[in-house]
Image: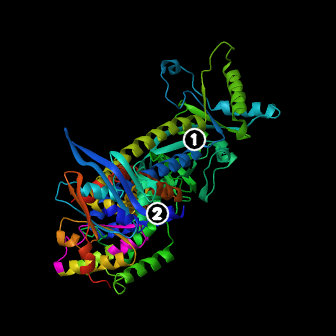
Amino acid sequence: MTPNDTMRARGPLVIDIENITKQYVMGEEVIHALRGVTLQIRRNEYLAVMGPSGSGKSTLMNMLGCLDTPSSGRYEFNGKNVSEMDGDELADIRNREIGFVFQTFNLLPRSTSLRNVELPLIYAGIGPVEREERAAQALTDVGLGDRLSHKPNELSGGQRQRVAVARALVNNPSIILADEPTGNLDSKTGEEIMALFESLYQQGNTVILVTHEADIAAHARRSVHLRDGVIESDALHVEVREAVPVH
Amino acid sequence: MRRFLYELSESWKIAAAQMAANKTRSMLTALGVIIGIVAVTLMGTAINGISIGFDKSMSFIGDDVLYVTTRPWTRVDDWWNYRDRPKILTEYADKINRSIAATPNSNLLIAVPTMSLVRSVKAGDNTVDNVFILGTTADYALISTIECDQGRYFSGLESQDGAEVCVVGFDVADALFAGNGALDKKILINGHRFKIIGSLAKQGTFLGLFSLDSIVIIPLPAFKKYFSAKSDADVRVKVRDKTHMADARDELTGIMRRLRGLPPEKRDNFNINEQQALKSTLDGVKATIAIAGLFITGLSLFVGAIGIMNITFVSVKERTKEIGTRKALGARRRTILLQFLIESTALCLLGGLIGLSFAYFMCFGMAHAFPSFPISFSFGLVIAAMIVSVLTGLASGIAPAWSASRLDPATALRYE
């Protein structure tokens, strides 16, 4: 049984990518970052995208996160064709459907946790009262209910990343896209963040990790390896599912 | 729409936070706008003041008086055509008055002759130089704006007899008697003794050039007797209704041509002047001053705007990653555009407000230091300065804000 056969049984398609390519022009050189990638991700999957630097991992992440559009190929997100959307339509998709978690947290330094988490809701056009309520709830959900009015420089690295996770969750997105989420954390804090992702997955969220670290990727249920702009392998880790304790 | 409002209020909060976080930088940048706004506002105030001063000076001439003179007031290019004109005689006034009386529904009211020259005036040890000595009749009080502060103007009898009495202007009375009351004192004009029967209220200056208060008015016969019977005279004619100025002018021209015995084919050998003609000449001068002044001070505001533009570019560069993050979280292009536009506008508005309050206090101080200079700090000017500030902010912010809004989110996120 191939991985896709197993998945088809579990949930509707969220991401449907077919044979996408991406070329960049750098001076006179054309860089083929993706050379034909086909990938399907269903609801409530926990997927790791792996690969060495230069493998096209970041480019694929930009595609998955609707930060960029492919040069050719088809990309459907929840049945909508993303490959032909303009900048503002993509912004709306990112706002509603995708929760980003970055390696460097990317919090606004002079804003409180609450204001940081409110940001996607402002762009969604949600009123101030509901905004604050939902942001406070999201922060409580990641265990920061008592850090609402702290600014990033008053929080530890792990807490900052939790704020970022709360910000990613606050719009109830279809996928959570985490780019090296533990890259700037020590291993103990990193494990705590991975436990948070695990519980999000257990609650029914779709989580995509982009990482080059095998032990981080090992938390996922499926991993996709990229090399030279193509998918080298796409496998389920049956053994992990049993190894990781389910809360 | 709601979303737009939330984005707008968010943008203002960001702008305020940004200024609070970079206080020194914001103040230094705003300084350019502050100086610009101070310069433009002061220039605006000065132009306003000049304009008010012009109008005030003009009212001295009177907008309902025609001046019959040998030569025109305004500059002419063919001066040789005016060189050999016959003099205007004081007797014309009587003749004009007779003609007015003989004409039913005349547009003219009364004609008054005047002669003038400049002399020194003495009283005891005090001397005032360059005093305007005006010889005229009792009717002068009817056509001019002069008003006696103390005493009275001379009567028709005194005027006819050429009595040695005079009415002195404020400056003359002040310089000779220093507030001790000039009434009934004697003054010497060219060695001839005149008794002061009235002193005039302060009138100010004419276009800031010379004082209207440095004047002595004496009866015309006395003027002719002691000074110059031959010097050039003017005849001032008050019109009945200033809305019929052109008709009055035509009537007066007709009377003058008859007095001069000019056949129809001959051109006028006199001039009829009025305030309006002078005013339109001066309006041109006024406009030139205004345009030149505002252009030059506008340059300083322009320099300020460049400073704002520069700092907004720096701000965009510094916060590339933040822009990337905001875009990743769903900020549209216009959201980013708005954010940086509002930032530059807020900075300009701050500079404008500070500049305006500086300008206000400077005007206040100037008004105290130079009470004679008409300064007008108007509400309209405040509004104009605010609008200019906002426009400056928008103009200087648009290029950096545009470049920020066009940033590619993926590239911006990777920017270090």
Residue tagged 1: B135
| Residue type marked 2 | Leu
| Residue type marked 1 | Gly
> Could you say where residue B16 lies in the image, as x and y percent from the top left?
38, 68
In the image, which disc is placed on residue B8? 2
> Could you say where residue B371 lies in the image, as x and y percent from the top left?
45, 59
Q: Is residue B110 above or below residue A137?
A: above
**Identity of the residue drawn at 57% across and 47% down:** B164
Q: Residues within 10 Å of mark 2 (few under 14, many from 20)?
A: some
Taking B87 as reference, is B25 left or right?
left
Q: CA distance from mark 1 to mark 2?
A: 72 Å
> For the residues carrying marks 1 and 2, which lies nearer the camera in this image?
2
Is residue A185 found inside the magenta-colored segment of the image? yes
Residue B391 visible in the displayed image: yes
Query: Magenta segment, which residues?
Result: A165-187
Within the image, what quadrant is residue A106 found in? bottom left
Query: Which quadrant: the N terminus of chain B?
Result: bottom right
